[in-house]
Amino acid sequence: MKLLVLLIVFSIIFLGASSSEATVIPKLKYYTVSGKVISEEDETPLVGVTIRATDQKGAYSNSKGEFSLQLAAGTHHLVLTMVGMEKLIATLNVKSDTSGIVFRMLTNPAILEGVVVIAEDPGMRLMRRAIEKKKEQSNQVNSYKYLLYTKFVVQTDTITAGRTDKPADSTIFSIFESYSVGYFLKPNNYYNKIIQRRQSDNVPPQANFVAFGTNLNIYDDFITILGEEIFTPFHPNAPDFYDFILDTNYFDYENISIRRIIVNTTTDLRRMFSGYVYLNEETLMPTKVELYPNVALRLPFNTKMKIVQTFHNDTFTFPQRLEITTSSQANIFGLIQPRLDINLLTYATNFEVNVEIDKRLFNSRSVDVAPNADKFDTTFWETNKFVELTKDELDAYYAIRRFREAPDSAKAQTFSQNIFVLLPASWKNSNDVLSQVGKICSSTTK
């Protein structure tokens, strides 16, 4: 999957190209949550209970029924499972270190002498039906074409960025935007042509390759990160290695047919996701996913990643809005620790299904740039404004331009100069940067 490879490649380059002045930035705050698990019937400690948070790794209760978890500040759904006991779902709002929590689990009434059939969770049954629905779509869709808007925002601490726009120690360093026309042809051919692009003044146009986000679709069987396949919750065999649990406490007041399914991994050895799938119970089509890679995927710089995607649901299910947020804390030779926060947002629309597509499009590079892509077409951008820039992003465009135009700025070194210092000699021709990055991404994409 090209998008996440691009995120990692860009992160590594960016951190190497950052200002030589850096500072130690406090890491994301985690708190210790501890307690014990006991039987509801006789209050005896339960040993070997699995306690998993949807966005964190899990823990097990010890011989005294005790457990301890490190959780980030915020709301978490914990799922407790143990053979012979009913699953327990608990919601915790973590604000500080917390101890003394007691979870009480009930004996599963199906686990009785002579009973060998255990009822399947309603969430698992819904996901089995949704996967069958997806198989039907796969058999019917042979090609499609669409329009994609992509926005890529890099934010860092003020010293690494070399400037500050507001009191908080967080500054938008660079912004990339593009529109591209995407093409898909079975079995696995992708091509995108960038038709319009713009970027902040510290980024040369040839470095704006953000159309590489095109192929990320959680509704696919798998996506690829750093050359490693991650099976999605919609893979045909997902029920074999995912645990799907219906969240009975969730209710959508706007659409009563929407169900939230808690997604848990059954092992930390396989690369998978945890999080939530929002599914229409009537159509069996997903409306939204919120997912986190599990610990089996070792991202560089201890990167934390969150993926949220919504879907178009008409005759077929296609990706609509995608947002990936990552936060990294690099440690360069133990001397500097710049922080890097990336937000990548895409919006796909105007899908045309089973259209004729020239196969020659897929013969060369997977992304191309139209000759007039850098000639700003005001009418086009206004007509296709699917996602508004935030006030901070608009301010950053102006602030970066003003900073670079300052004649007395000792740090007015161009982003492209920093980048090109790090590139291999064969890449120094700026016109070839796009194709080289394309080769990296293509080699890790199926």
Image (cartoon, rainbow, N blue to C red):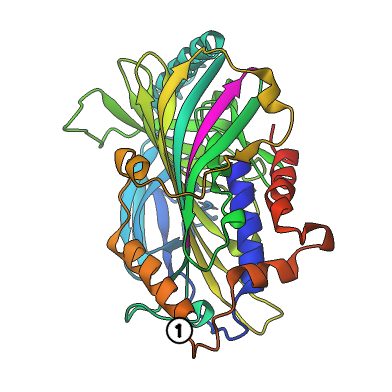
Image x and y of residue 163, in percent:
45, 81
Report the residue at 62% width, 82% height from top. 336
Image check: 2 left or right of 318?
Answer: right
Q: Is residue 322 above or below residue 344?
A: above
Farthest residue to the left: give it. 253
Amino acid type at mark 1: Ala
Which SS type dominates the magenta stretch? strand
Image check: 358 left or right of 342?
Answer: right
Q: Which residues are magenta?
A: 175-186
Image x and y of residue 197, in percent:
48, 49
Image x and y of residue 301, in percent:
62, 65
Report the residue at 53% width, 43% height from top. 372
Say which quadrant the C terminus sits in.
top right
How many numbered marks does the figure carry?
1
Say what secondary structure mark 1 lies in.
loop
Examine the structure image and report whether residue 185 is included in the region drawn in magenta.
yes
Q: Is residue 442 visible?
A: yes
Say which quarter of the image contains residue 272: top right
Decide which of 140, 31 is in the foreground and name it: 140
Report the residue at 32% width, 34% height from top. 247
Say which quarter of the image contains residue 259: top left
Q: Is residue 434 above or below residue 302?
A: above
